[in-house]
């Protein structure tokens, strides 16, 4: 979509809060089996928007608030949590 808008209007286009990301820290990637690491893809767009909204209610931003976010749909819950922010 950004490419189409760029062709039509010009300028620079940036994707902010991409719809699917892998933000696991190195510790969360460990599986206990040598050379096998966990990967993930979370739908971060809603998670990040929700985190910003709740941090704002607390009078903070996502950099100085500790928030736990979880996706509770599907076969297993997903907790894409970062240590800071």
Image (cartoon, grey):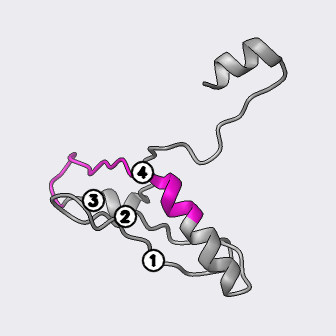
Please report contact status of discs 3 and 2: CB closer than 8 Å, yes or no: yes
> Which residue matches tag 2?
27
Nearer the N terminus, badge 4 or badge 3?
Answer: 3
Q: Seen in the image, is 27 located left or right of residue 30?
A: right
Q: Seen in the image, is 36 located left or right of residue 84?
A: left
Label 3: which secondary element: loop
> Which residue matches tag 1?
68
Which residue is at a point 34% across and 65% down the rendered structure image? 71
> With respect to residue 62, does 76 lie above or below?
above
Q: Give whichever of 33, 2 is nearer the camera.
A: 2
Q: Residue furthest bottom?
A: 58
Span colored in magenta: 32-49
Which residue is at a point 72% across and 81% down the rendered structure image? 60
Which residue is at a point 49% across and 44% down the rendered structure image? 19
> Which residue matches tag 3?
30
Residue 27: where, in percent of width, then height? Answer: 37, 64
């Amino acid at each position: 979509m950004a490419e189409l808008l760029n062709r039509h209007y010009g300028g620079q286009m940036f994707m902010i809060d991409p719809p699917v990301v892998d933000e696991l820290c190195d510790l969360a990637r460990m599986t206990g089996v040598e050379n096998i690491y966990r990967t993930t893809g979370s739908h971060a767009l809603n998670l990040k928007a929700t985190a910003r909204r709740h941090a704002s209610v607390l009078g903070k931003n996502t950099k100085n608030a500790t928030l736990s976010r979880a996706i509770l749909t599907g076969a297993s819950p997903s907790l894409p949590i970062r240590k800071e922010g």
